[in-house]
């Protein structure tokens, strides 16, 4: 088979020559503007996020007065952020508020920082937040002193009374009742505000109120282990055997409550200062503090035969005006089967008051009282105040007291008693006096007095007829003058008659003087008769008080003028 011939070779047709332009540069100057714009935009974004600062979360009980995007965050009146968002918590019991803080506020976000909503408030510390009535509510931020950062906080419902980091001493006060005290209540010493109450907590077991107190460092030396705190607010009014006692610290404390404490004892040089967190009892008043310092502990039983109405528990037991004890109670349970039915009164005496031993040795006090009973020491009831009728127990030595010793009834030692002149006995005496007054023959006395007055008036009238003008005495004197004139020739008889005339003139003058006095005596007796008739009680209780004159009384006669003596003829 013949070999095949190779296929013919085809060649491409010749291409025409193509002319190419030279290559241009890849970067064009026109891209400069977009690049600059992109860099500027990136710089602005970076600057925005760098200036925006962190976002923190604060949990509040409610969002009253908080508006997203408007409510500012202030720290000492400087704006450091804004509320960015509000949302409810998962349990719908609280509100989560997000705060967009400024970049400069990063250093303030530490764990002991405090945040609250500033709004108008009224508390024990007074009014606050009144500026928000114009500007609106805002978030108040108080920076702490810690070095540890934090981004989640629990907002406070009330402003903190004391900023964190303030030097001072912090302690706790425990009381049975709040007594109007709350957060922000001032602690006052001698009228100066030295601290505040920072918190108030009620514990159910036991049922007590606990306060966190703070005193500034400048006044911390005033408080030591023996300091006693008490509520000094309001009006302390006490009515008892001592009468009515009223105490108020100041006008400000009368309107609001406050806490104060006792003075440090200058005689105690080695008393320890208090430490943070130490507990103290908060007393209700200064009188409660004095009760603690006054510690009656020796019991005695008193048996009284009369009424003890007005003798209240805690009534004082005094020895010559000095309180030495207190009344515990008056009850028949101390002596239930007494055949004389006496009223048992239990008292307690403070041994430190009666002895010079500061610790108050009970044995020495009992021996002292036992010796005093042998010498006439007795207990009696006295009225402490006529206004309140309260009684107290007085211990004193009685004159001519019957011999007695301390006896025992059950678990109690019995002090001898003596009856006192109380209101009941005074009423009995007054009743007896009134009975005697009723038995007086007042009408008979008045009648006799009127009869005596009439007799005296009759005698005065006859005396006037005897000595007045035209009376027989005047006629006798005239006749004597005539005889004297006729016998004037005889010298001896003339002298005698002249002496007689002088004697008659003196008698006339004397009778003229005595006549008004007799009339005044009659007027006094008339007044006495009217007094006995219309005011008979003045026979028993005379008084210097002037009563208005009785219209039915007989008016006293006007005094008569004295009859002039006859002129003597020379």
Image: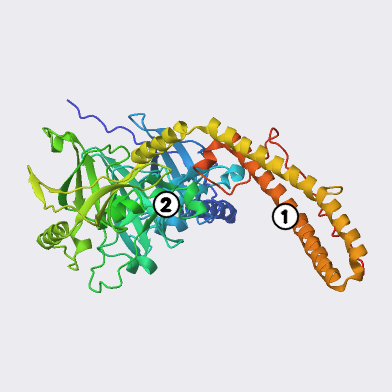
Q: Residues within 10 Å of mark 2 (few under 14, many from 20)?
A: many
Q: Judge by depth and name the residue closer to the eye, 55 or 300.
A: 300
Residue 342 in picture, x, y percent from top left: 18, 37
Q: As displayed, is residue 506 above or below residue 432?
A: below
Q: Which residue reaches farthest top? A: 1
- Is residue 228 left or right of 30 when viewed as pictured? left
Element marked by disc 2:
loop
Label at residue 86: none
Q: As displayed, is residue 558 above or below residue 512?
A: above
- Is residue 528 left or right of 416 when viewed as pictured? right
Label at residue 258: 2
Q: Residue at x 72, y 47 (%)?
A: 519
Precedes in sequence: disc 2 or disc 1? 2
Element marked by disc 1:
helix
Q: Residue at x 34, y 36 (%)?
A: 9
Q: Judge by depth and name the residue closer to the eye, 237 or 102.
A: 237
Label at residue 514: 1
Q: Residue at x 46, y 50 (%)?
A: 125
Q: Judge by depth and name the residue closer to the eye, 425 or 365.
A: 425
Residue 29 in picture, x, y percent from top left: 58, 56
Q: Judge by depth and name the residue closer to the eye, 456 or 445.
A: 456
Q: Residues within 10 Å of mark 1 (few under 14, many from 20)?
A: some
Residue 220 in picture, x, y percent from top left: 34, 66
Where, by quadrant of the figure, is residue 167 drawn? bottom left
- Is residue 390 left or right of 341 when viewed as pictured? right
């Amino acid at each position: 088979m013949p070999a095949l011939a190779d296929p013919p070779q085809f060649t491409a047709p010749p291409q025409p020559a193509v002319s190419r332009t030279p290559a241009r540069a890849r970067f064009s100057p026109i891209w400069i503007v977009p690049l600059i714009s992109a860099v500027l935009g990136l710089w602005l974004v970076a600057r925005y996020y760098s200036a925006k600062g962190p976002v923190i979360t604060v949990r509040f009980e409610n969002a009253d007065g908080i508006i997203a995007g408007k409510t500012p965050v202030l720290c000492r009146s400087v704006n450091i952020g804004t509320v960015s968002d509000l949302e409810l918590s998962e349990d719908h019991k609280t509100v989560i508020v997000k705060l967009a803080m400024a970049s400069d506020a990063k250093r303030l976000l530490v764990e002991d920082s405090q945040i609250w909503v500033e709004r108008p408030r009224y508390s024990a510390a007074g009014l606050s937040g009144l500026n928000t009535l114009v500007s609106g509510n805002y978030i108040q931020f108080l920076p702490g002193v810690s070095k540890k950062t934090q981004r989640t906080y629990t907002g406070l419902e009330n402003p903190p009374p004391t900023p964190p980091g303030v030097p001072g001493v912090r302690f706790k006060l425990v009381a049975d009742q709040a007594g109007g005290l709350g957060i922000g209540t001032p602690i006052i010493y001698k009228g100066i505000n030295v601290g505040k109450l920072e918190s108030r907590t009620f514990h159910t077991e036991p049922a007590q109120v606990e306060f966190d107190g703070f005193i500034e460092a400048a006044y911390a030396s005033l408080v030591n282990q023996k300091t006693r705190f008490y509520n000094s607010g309001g009006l302390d009014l006490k009515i008892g055997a001592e009468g009515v006692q009223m105490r108020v610290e100041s006008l400000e404390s009368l309107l609001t409550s406050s806490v104060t404490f006792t003075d440090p004892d200058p005689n105690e040089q080695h008393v320890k200062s208090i430490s943070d967190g130490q507990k103290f009892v908060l007393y209700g008043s200064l009188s409660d503090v004095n009760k603690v310092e006054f510690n009656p502990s020796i019991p005695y039983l008193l048996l009284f035969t009369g009424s003890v109405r007005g003798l209240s528990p805690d009534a004082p037991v005094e020895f010559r005006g000095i309180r030495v004890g207190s009344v515990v109670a008056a009850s028949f349970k101390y002596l239930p089967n007494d055949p004389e039915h006496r009223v048992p009164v239990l008292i307690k005496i403070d041994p430190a008051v009666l002895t010079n031993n500061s610790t108050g040795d009970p044995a020495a006090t009992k021996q002292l009282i036992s010796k005093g009973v042998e010498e006439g020491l007795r207990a009696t009831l006295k009225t402490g105040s006529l206004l309140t009728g309260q009684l107290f127990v007085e211990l004193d030595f009685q004159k001519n007291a019957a011999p007695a010793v301390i006896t025992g009834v059950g678990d109690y030692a019995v002090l001898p008693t003596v009856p006192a002149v109380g209101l009941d006995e005074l009423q009995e005496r007054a009743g007896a006096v009134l009975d005697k007054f009723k038995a007086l023959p007042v009408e008979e006395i008045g009648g006799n007095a009127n009869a005596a007055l009439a007799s005296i008036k009759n005698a005065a009238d006859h005396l006037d007829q005897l000595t007045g003008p035209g009376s027989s005495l005047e006629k006798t004197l005239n006749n004597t003058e005539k005889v004297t004139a006729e016998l004037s020739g005889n010298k001896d008889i003339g002298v005698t008659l002249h002496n007689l005339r002088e004697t008659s003139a003196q008698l006339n003058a004397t009778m003229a003087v005595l006549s008004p006095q007799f009339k005044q005596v009659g007027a006094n007796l008339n007044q006495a008769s009217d007094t006995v008739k219309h005011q008979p009680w003045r026979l028993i209780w005379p008084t210097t008080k002037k009563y208005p004159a009785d219209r039915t009384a007989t008016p006293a006669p006007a005094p008569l003028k004295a009859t002039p003596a006859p002129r003597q003829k020379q």
